[in-house]
Amino acid sequence: MTPDDQFTAPLFAGVDVGGTNVKVGLVDDRGKIVADTKFPTSPGESPDIAILQALEEFKALIEPSGFQWSDVAAAGLGTPGPMDIHRGVILTPTNLPGWHNFPVQGKLAEVLGKPVTYANDAGAAAFGEFWVGGGQQHSSMVMITLGTGVGGGIIIDDLSVDGANSHGAEIGHIVIDTRDDARICGCGQAGHLEAYASATALVERTREAMGNPDAGTVLRNLIGETSPLSALMVATAADEGDALAMKLVSETAVYLGRGIAQLAHLIDPAAFILGGAMNFGGADSPLGVKFLNEVKAEVRRLVFPVLGERLVLNFAKLGSEAGFVGAAGLARSQYNRTR
């Protein structure tokens, strides 16, 4: 077998480390996925095991593709949690206790025999959307991921904004509430966007609202059938017209809009892209479209008129593939800069 004409060499390898799975994929020079797979992370074990497994998976992926390992020019790696990107060290990720203070970039480069570009997992996903996803028509973009927490990435002119201390684009920790009784974020600080607009926050706010015995008929029925309460359950209830659930989703849109308004004034990107598991059905769902429009309305209420008029805010397109595609894309960008 020879490489199909649909793929363009060189290839780039992408590794997206999560608390449950490691996703790996081979991507061509135009951002097309040649092949991909995933395997369990085993978070309590040494990351050396996962790195060796990644090599074996890449060998298995490339063999039937018609390409050779020598066709892979570089690799990209995205990991969660605190990290020192400049030193290539993953620090203390909550969901990966066996990975603490591990020189993951250098170890992966040694095993793969390729230069490795290192990034925060959300930053890698953002670059994927920038390269071949929802932001590919723009020179700059901010991606915001809504899930258990609120993450994100900032891409400007093909570069990921990582920061001097590897804490750039910590979008979930923008302060949107300075009151004394502001909600407490998972990081321990008060008033952060993550404490209001994440799936975790939506569940907490829903539990509080359910204290009213007349609230949330559909929600109460769902909780009776399925437990525990989840953000998906709230979205389902809102889809079915539950007034409380719809109110909670709308409030989430307002909170998110406040955070985006700050980013719009600070960065003035060409586009904002919303990703993550909590998208309320996305662009194909009436609830998702309603949510997006309510976010836009709040942003426009708060920003300079020109920013509101030109606001581009869309859902992400790559889904779970964004992480490894973006990691590969960052590797490609670094490779092209150093050729």
Image (cartoon, rainbow, N blue to C red):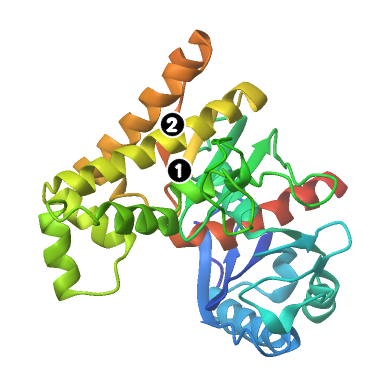
Question: Local crowd at mark 2 within 10 Å, few (<14), some, or many (≥20)?
Answer: many
Would you place residue 327 above or below residue 38 in this image? above
CA gap, disc 1 and disc 2? 7 Å
Q: Amino acid at mark 2?
A: Leu
Q: x, y percentage for residue 204?
A: 38, 58
Q: Are marks 1 and 2 in contact (CB under 8 Å)?
A: yes
Would you place residue 68 above or below residue 141 in this image? below
- SS class of the residue under badge 2? strand
Return the residue at label 1.
274
Mark 1 or mark 2, earlier in chain: 1
| Residue 56 visible in this rendered orientation of the protein | yes
Would you place residue 183 above or below residue 41 in this image? above
Can you tell which mark lies on residue 313?
2
- SS class of the residue under badge 1? strand
From this viewpoint, which residue is outermost toward the top? 305
Residue beneath the point at 11% across and 65% down: 221
Q: Amino acid at mark 1?
A: Leu
